[in-house]
Image (spheres, helix red, strand yellow):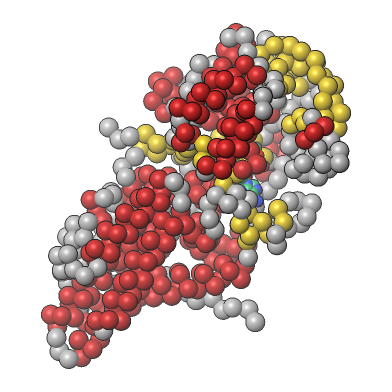
Amino acid sequence: MAQKFYVTTPIYYVNDVPHIGHAYTTVAADTLARWRRLHGDDVVFLTGTDEHGLKVQQAAEKNGVSPQEWADKTSLRFAETWKMLDITNTDFIRTTEPRHRVAVQEFLQRVYDNGFIELDSYEGLYCVPCEAYYVEDDLNNGNCPDHGIPVERVKEENYFFRLSRFEQRLLDYYAEHPEAVAPESRRNEVLGFIKQGLRDFSMSRTSITWGIPLPWDENHVTYVWFDALFNYCTAVGFSADPERFAEVWPADYHLIGKDILRFHAVFWPAMLMAAGLEPPKHVFAHGFLMVGGERMSKTRLNQIAPADLVETFGSDGFRYHFLVDQHFGPDGDFSFEQMLTRYNADLANNFGNLASRVLNMAVSYCDSATPSSRENGPLAAASVHALERLETAMESLNFSSGFTAVWDFIGATNAYIEDRQPWALSKAGDAEATAAVIGDCLEALRIIAILSSPVLPRASSELWSRLGLPGSPTEARLPTDVVWGSASTVGNSLVKGAALFPRLDVPS
Ligand code: MSP
């Protein structure tokens, strides 16, 4: 039976519309999902929207609609954006769905029955955009350290989650599972935070109504983070389908931005432990995409909508930039000029030109049919090397270095053509040598189509059909199908086609 692989993105708040920061995480998760499918895994890939809480309630009020109407409208915008970017999520969860309410209530009851939720009163400094309490020491001149706006003093009688009781268990867990939080700098941050001592946190609210009521006290709604994190369990059948839940949980990867690391690597595993459930296997927190050196935000008016870039670069061009041009881990600055330059260099020139050159020559010199490639031809070793580098890089979610290895292979194939000059061989009447070189290049292209398919689903599949190959590169399996000469391609009918990535003019 195929191995299960469960990957998630954060569920995005519906107080905001999708921007390239959200798309960054989602495209990475999609590439990982596609990558695992190439290995034959049965992939469960979840994304969705976080629809409860004060922020959403306030956004709806400001727009004069009910929170549900607001959530319906904005959630759809996320779903549409993911479709535009060829995201292959297998489920899309909305926290206002009945399945989620049922699952969260069952989970809460369990944690309450286990004695980890208790009534207490609390006075604290609250930041609404963070939906979190702070202590004086955390603040910058009285302002939230993250948003730079004043926090509010709030006093509530609330239910508390006894996070403090999980300090040692979390430390033990992370000592036994050093791979559970990555990159390493983030793991150190988490350990440092736990070692400072964990405070219980308030997990219910009476001041708002837009949330899931606590099953044992309906005057309280569940704190938005407590509700939100559980989406990862709801979607794989926590309440509705225990058999499936047992099969799919724990998640293999939660991909998140560094802003929500503590929630995912401290609160969340403790909440799961409190219910007798296993923590996720890996939490990977990437950095922030900045625009002009600043974090994107509604107030700074510097958010970029994915659609604006897709219009120019196409969905593949968008995916390539955020995965290969940007490093998944540290912060990165978005620059249109850099995106354009790399698009022209890597996609239009390297990838696109290789495909059209080889196909054009094959059509002209080989009667539009694939000649046989040489067993262990000169490019075979380079293809093995590319796969090895890609496999190693993907273990640590280093998309940039992994796919650069594929582009190096593309470069090597282009260089091979320059070196052998098949046009000269053909002119000299050496049909055998011409066919051998073209056969090698076509085999390289077949392998390139498979290896680039997680990042460039459209171009790779178009290339696949121009190569006269049946099905789609997504049906290939690694490593067998990228073994040099593993497919019977001789005689396949080849099609030239238009440029896969038309060159874009650089604005003067
Ligand atoms: N709803 C919570 C998450 C709950 S998960 C159980 C939330 N939502 S959010 O809409 O604010 O989205 C947060 C995520 O979007 C970040 O963690 C990150 O993955 C992504 N990004 C949002 N802005 C970003 C950048 N500027 N750069 C990169 N990713 C960013 O927090």
Query: Which residue is located at x 70 percent, y 25 percent?
Result: 223
At 53% across and 51% down in the image, what residue appears? 328
Decide if residue 414 is on the left or right side of residue 65. Answer: left
Residue at 41%, 72% (x, y): give it: 350
Q: Is residue 178 above or below residue 276?
A: below
- Residue 470's x, y, as percent? 26, 57
Tell me where residue 100 appears, x and y as whole percent: 58, 26
Residue 415 location, quadrant: bottom left
Q: Is residue 343 depicted above or below 488 in this figure?
A: below
| Above-or-below relation of 41 to 249 | below
Ligand 1 falls in quadrant = top right
Q: Nearer the viewer, residue 313 or 137?
A: 137
320, above or below 234, in the image: below
Question: Image quadrant for the N terminus?
Answer: top left
Q: Is residue 17 visible?
A: yes
Position of 4 compared to 48: left or right? Answer: left
Left-right relation of 332 to 69? left
Q: What residue is shown at x 76% (from left), y 13% (from top)?
A: 120
Q: Residue 119: image x %, image y %?
A: 73, 11
- Front-lying residue, 296 or 474: 296
What is the total number of numbered labels drawn onto the structure image?
0
Which quarter of the rendering shows the C terminus? Answer: bottom right
Relative to 453, is 195 on the left or the right? right
The image quarter containing residue 112 is: top right
Q: Horizontal and vertical percent for residue 91?
A: 49, 37
Identity of the residue furthest to the bottom in this view:
428
Is residue 58 visible to the viewer in this orientation of the structure?
no
279, 199: nearer the viewer: 199
